[in-house]
Each structure stands twice: as structure tokens, then as C-alpha cells.
């Protein structure tokens, strides 16, 4: 069954962002996949995900975006058991 398209932005308190980024950094450093929950949906980001940083400027605003991208075929289903790097971010 194909997953429904989704495009969501979630605002978090600074301490929550710090915790998420710390777990993300730990997983990246170890070369492990990790799980994250955003707006009620939990999913696994595979260790082969590509990481990019974007900077945008326009209309009196600037934005920095940290982005992980992967093929759906690379990611195990979200209901599989936790493995190394299985912390929910």
C-alpha cells in the first residue's frame, strides 16, 4: 500500500530541536539509520540518506534548511522493530 503524499512543517521549542539535532548528529556520525516522529507520524531515515543544507534569501527573510533525502525503496517500513540507531528523534 502506497503512503499518502505529505508536506508538513512543524515548529518545536529550542530544547526539543537541540535534542532532535543531537540524536541526528549521533546517528550520522555512527553511520546508522534513525527514527523520527513529526506531527504524529513516525518513520525511519535510512543511513544512506543524502544530507544537504540550503540557504535562501528573499523578501526581507532568510532561511537555513537542513534536509535529508532518500528513496522510499531505501527505507524500511516504519512498523519494523528498532535496530541500532533506533532512537525516536
Image: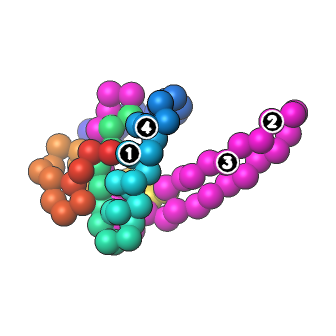
Residue tagged by mark 4?
15
Check whether the beta carbons of the residues at disc 1 and disc 4 lie within 8 A of each other. Answer: yes
Identify the residue at horizontal 51%, vertical 29% (top origin). 11
Residue tagged by mark 1?
19
Q: CA distance from mark 1 to mark 4?
A: 6 Å
- As drawn, which residue projects farthest toward the left? 81
The percent position of residue 8, horizontal first and vertical second, equals 51, 31
| Snapshot quadrant of residue 34 | bottom left
User: Dot 1 surroundings within 10 Å: few (below 14), some, or many (20 or more)?
Assistant: few
Q: Is residue 3 left or right of residue 67?
A: left
Q: CA distance from mark 2 to mark 4?
A: 24 Å
Q: Quadrant of the N terminus?
A: top left
Instruction: Please tell me which residue lies in front, 86 or 48.
Output: 86
In terms of secondary structure, where does tag 2 sit?
Answer: strand
Residue stretch in magenta: 39-68
User: Dot 4 surroundings within 10 Å: few (below 14), some, or many (20 or more)?
Assistant: few
Residue tagged by mark 3?
64
Please identify, in this view, whether the residue under mark 3 or under mark 4 is nearer the observer: 4
- Whether 46 is among the magenta residues is yes
Main secondary structure of the magenta stretch: strand
Q: Is residue 33 left or right of residue 4?
A: left
Amino acid at each position: 500500500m502506497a503512503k499518502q503524499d505529505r508536506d508538513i512543517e512543524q515548529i518545536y521549542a529550542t530544547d526539543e530541536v537541540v535534542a532532535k539535532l543531537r540524536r541526528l548528529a549521533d546517528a550520522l556520525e555512527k553511520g546508522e539509520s534513525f527514527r523520527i516522529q513529526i506531527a504524529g507520524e513516525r518513520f525511519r531515515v535510512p543511513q544512506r540518506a543524502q544530507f544537504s543544507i540550503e540557504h535562501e534569501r528573499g523578501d526581507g527573510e532568510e532561511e537555513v534548511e537542513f534536509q535529508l533525502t532518500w528513496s522510499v525503496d531505501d527505507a524500511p517500513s516504519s512498523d519494523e522493530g528498532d535496530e541500532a540507531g533506533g532512537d525516536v528523534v
